[in-house]
Amino acid sequence: MIKFSSRFMALIQIFALILAPFQALAAANFPDVPVSHLHYQAVQYLRDRNIINGYPDGLFRPENVVTRAEILKIAANGASIATVSFASQPAAFPDVANNHPLKQYINWAQATGAVKGYFDGTFRPEATVTRGEAAKILLKINNIQPDPPTNYYFLDAPQTIDLAPYIYFAVLKNLIVAQGNIYGTGVGMKRGDVAEMMYRVLIIKQNNYAPFGGQPSSIPTPTVAAKTLNISIQNFAYNPPSISINKGDTLVWKNMDAAPHAVTIQNMTSGQAGFFDSGTLAQGQEYRFTFNQTGTFTYKCTFHPTMVATVTVQ
């Protein structure tokens, strides 16, 4: 039998102690969330703190959707809230079975006002949580109550809805990304996305709510739908003689007189940006022009030079 010296055995033990943390780290990785995965850091951070876990087969399945019940567990665990006392209570909603594995989180959320059910009294625990709901649930349960926004505009999340403050805060602090004026309020969330959002919430809490990554995201400002406005040419005058419009708006001039008229910009020549010239407008004829640059434009009637008016484009 081969015998090893006590010194050699001691070296083996030291080497094992050195390797142990790295072995534990490797074992902690989900096979389907490799280091190259977009949400690797977030998933590992939450797993190391027992905020999330995988499936019995050891996978995390980042592409699976997250239900309304599941996100309550993630949010409560992230906020270090104990919910076990609610496990023995009857289900708070008629569509939540008493043996539902996440009943304690649903009961806790209902009792504390963290979430509300639907108008028909149900909770719909297996419904996919949306991006709008996720922003509110993760922030509210982590004691973040944003002020109502005053300077953002998302087409699918008007400022009048109760989700608006949470959506504004989430985008501003880089917890989630919007696509221009579209937030994706009703789009379902996946496990990887929710893990990323939960991770970022915890990081900004540690950093006194500074935006994740250091710089706040730009928030879209209100946009005004383009309009078409009418100007009549009548009694040898433009009515109204001056008008203010927004960039992208269209003006339509209509000649109501028996005499011919025109709409021609002054101090500019054909080919210049912003130049317009209607040519001769007989009675009843129209001319339209869309203004795609800002400024103040003075125009006149080439047939009657005393007919002058202005357009201010903002």
Image: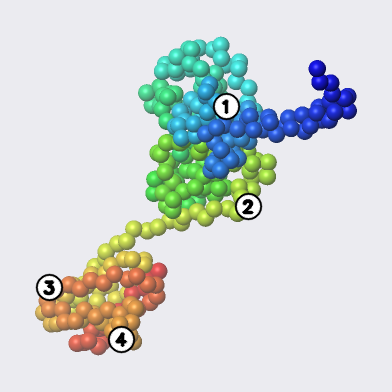
Q: Can you say whether 110 is above or below 229 in the image?
A: above
**Are discs 3 and 2 less than 8 Å apart at CB?**
no
Going by the numbered disc 2, the residue's amino acid type is Gly
Which of the 4 quarters of the picture holds residue 260? bottom left
Badge 4 local density, few (<14 within 10 Å), some, or many (20+)?
A: few
**Are discs 1 and 3 less than 8 Å apart at CB?**
no
Q: Element under label 1?
A: loop
Whether residue 237 is visible to the viewer of this picture, yes or no, is no
Which of the 4 quarters of the picture holds residue 284? bottom left
Q: Earlier in the sequence, mark 4 or mark 3?
A: 4
Q: Look at the image and tell me in which quarter the C terminus lies.
A: bottom left
Whether residue 54 is visible to the viewer of this picture, yes or no, is yes
Q: Which residue is mark 1?
A: 53
Badge 3 local density, few (<14 within 10 Å), some, or many (20+)?
A: few
Q: Earlier in the sequence, mark 1 or mark 2?
A: 1
Q: Which residue is mark 4?
A: 269
Q: Element under label 4?
A: loop
> For the residues marked 1 and 2, what is the alpha-carbon distance in whole angstroms?
29 Å
Q: Which residue is mark 2?
A: 214
> For the residues marked 1 and 3, what is the alpha-carbon distance in whole angstroms?
73 Å
Which of the 4 quarters of the picture holds residue 290? bottom left
